[in-house]
Amino acid sequence: MARLSTGGRNKSSPSRVTASSKNKKSDRAIQHDNTQSTGLARNQPGDPLPIKKNHRRYKPGTVSLREIRKYQKSTDLLLRKLPFARLVREIAAESIGFDYGLRWQSVAVLALQEACEAFLVNLFEDTNLLALHAKRVTIMQKDIQLARRIRGQ
């Protein structure tokens, strides 16, 4: 004969239903309504646990190569426009003087940004070649310094 499950309780203790245990569920519902009205959701003891996603772990270098291919395909600017514009205005104000109150056209700042990014990309290409020549994969500060020295900068 099959035994019935006791639900984790002792078989000998009778299950009593009291007024307080009947109202526990309705109390929890009231608590949920209060927390939802404040906009803060709190976990209650009976709520299910949130499901965590298992994030994929790639081999070292896989994501780097994917990013390299992505950025080599694209032609858009890599630096954010607003921080670059602030930097340009700050450097111009320091070199010329804060008294002049220079104004910049947006296309002038964009042209300057295009030129700066092209310069940096070419510098990093040369730096990468120097690192490969030294039988390294990682670029170092001395590679950048040598690339600039060879260029005559």
Image: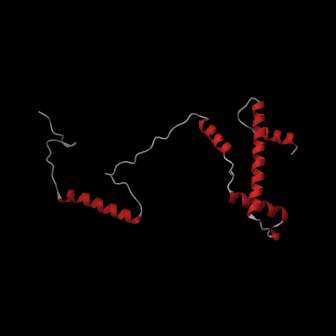
Farthest top residue in view: 135
Q: Is residue 132 left or right of residue 22?
A: right
Q: Report the label total.
A: 0
Q: Is residue 62 left or right of residue 43?
A: right
Residue 149: horizontal and vertical position, in percent?
86, 41
Residue 87: horizontal and vertical position, in percent?
74, 59
Q: Nearer the viewer, residue 81 or 136?
A: 81
Farthest left residue in view: 1
Query: Which image quarter: residue 122?
Result: top right
Residue 27: horizontal and vertical position, in percent?
27, 61
Q: Is residue 39 above or below residue 69?
A: below
Q: Is residue 137 left or right of residue 14?
A: right
Residue at 25% x, 57% y: name it.
25
Q: Quadrant of the N terminus?
A: top left
Residue 36: horizontal and vertical position, in percent?
37, 63
Farthest right residue in view: 152
Residue at 29% x, 59% y: name it.
28
Residue at 33% x, 63% y: name it.
33
Q: Nearer the viewer, residue 73 or 152?
A: 73
Q: Nearer the viewer, residue 40 or 15?
A: 40
Query: Which image quarter: residue 63?
Result: top right
Residue at 35% x, 64% y: name it.
34
Q: Quadrant of the C terminus?
A: top right
Q: How is the image coloured?
A: secondary structure
